[in-house]
Amino acid sequence: MVKSTLLRIVLAALGLICVGLGFAGILLPILPTTPFILLAAVLFSFSSQKLGLWLERNRTFGPYLKHWKEGTGIPKAVKAKVLAMLWVSLSITFFLLQKPILIALLAVIGTSVSIYIISIKPKKSGTIACKV
């Protein structure tokens, strides 16, 4: 915890901004959520234990931190939901834009993000390999 009150306020404010950007990342297909939530957790660890606990216990953002801390990756159900939201929102954007160059650019970005999400393998926790 930082001792300077002013610095704690600044760090807490930056953490809240990161939470806001993380929330926007849930709604916007191109903006990532996890890095902003992780950054907010770090900022709160230096500025406000109360905000840090709120973030960890938050129904929306708590699972991001839990999966990150445990190193369990992204569960399949979450991947499916994220990919569905990504492509539904991109499809709506394609329809609204109607500009082939922008549609192509967003399609490449969406495909890249999809490949990255699919490539994150969930790790099994607590499994022990035994030889008989």
Image (cartoon, grey):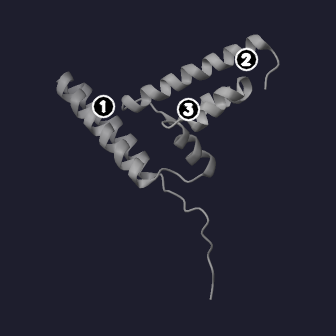
User: Which quarter of the figure has residue 57?
Assistant: top right
Q: Are marks 1 and 3 in contact (CB under 8 Å)?
A: no
Q: CA distance from mark 2 to mark 3?
A: 18 Å
Residue at mark 1: 106
* Percent coordinates x, y for residue 34 in the rendering: 52, 36
- Residue type marked 1: Leu
Q: Nearer the viewer, residue 112 or 123?
A: 123
The outermost residue toward the right is: 3
* Percent coordinates x, y for residue 4 in the rendering: 80, 14
- Crowd around label 2: few <14 · some 14–19 · many ≥20 (10 Å): some
Q: CA distance from mark 1 to mark 2?
A: 39 Å
Q: Earlier in the sequence, mark 1 or mark 2?
A: 2
Instruction: Residue at 19%, 27% (x, y): give it.
Output: 100
Image quarter where the C terminus lies is bottom right
Depicted 112 relative to depicted 36: above or below: below
Residue at mark 3: 37
Residue at mark 2: 8
Q: CA distance from mark 1 to mark 3?
A: 24 Å
Left or right: 93 in relation to 48: left
Left or right: 29 in relation to 74: left
